[in-house]
Image (spheres, grey):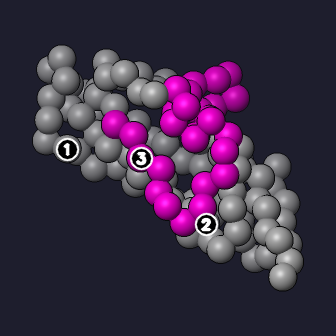
Amino acid sequence: MMSGFSQCSLKDLSVSQTQTGAKVQGKSEWVVTIRNNCECVQKDVILNCDGFQTVEQIDPSIFSISRNGCLVNNGQPIYKDAVKFKYAWDESFALSPKSSEIGCSKI
């Protein structure tokens, strides 16, 4: 579900992951960075996260698993500041933008 008054799209959300070098319960720790590369806000951001698992606690207001995917930032708007969280598992999971609502105010 994408809407907006600009050239922004789901493709303007980038999801990157890097290993921190730390181990949590013997699993590699990963930091996920979600950026909105658009001037408009994106809210209700849901990532594809099939099979996602972690042995590290994640703040559910930052990343929570639902049956539709994984909700980022509790559905709150993502502006230019990146949203980050860490998880720990044997390997990284493919996390990609699935849906968002784009809001741009006309000036």
Asked whether 52 falls inside the magenta stretch, the response is no
Quadrant into which the C terminus falls: bottom right
Residue position for label 2 = 12
- Return the x and y of residue 86 as percentages of the image width and height: 34, 37
Q: Are marks 3 and 1 in contact (CB under 8 Å)?
A: no
- Return the x and y of residue 7 as percentages of the image width and height: 75, 76
Q: Is residue 10 above or below residue 105?
A: above
Q: Is residue 20 above or below residue 55?
A: below
Residue farthest along the bottom direction in this orientation: 107
Q: Is residue 107 above or below residue 14?
A: below
With 52 as the anchor, is 67 left or right in this view?
right
Asked whether 72 falls inside the magenta stretch, the response is yes
Q: Amino acid at mark 1?
A: Thr
- Label located before the other in sequence (3 or 1): 1
What span is in magenta? 60-86
Residue farthest along the front direction in this orientation: 107
Q: Which residue is depicted at the point 22% across and 45% down?
A: 19
Q: Residues within 10 Å of mark 2 (few under 14, many from 20)?
A: some
Residue position for label 3 = 84
Whether residue 92 is visible: no
Quarter location, residue 3: bottom right
Q: Which residue is depicted at the point 54% across and 66% down?
A: 80
Residue position for label 1 = 20
Quarter location, residue 4: bottom right
**Front disc: 3 or 1:** 3
Q: Residues within 10 Å of mark 1 (few under 14, many from 20)?
A: few
- Label located before the other in sequence (2 or 3): 2
Q: Secondary structure at mark 3?
A: strand
- Return the x and y of residue 1 as percentages of the image width and height: 82, 49
- Label located before the other in sequence (1 or 2): 2
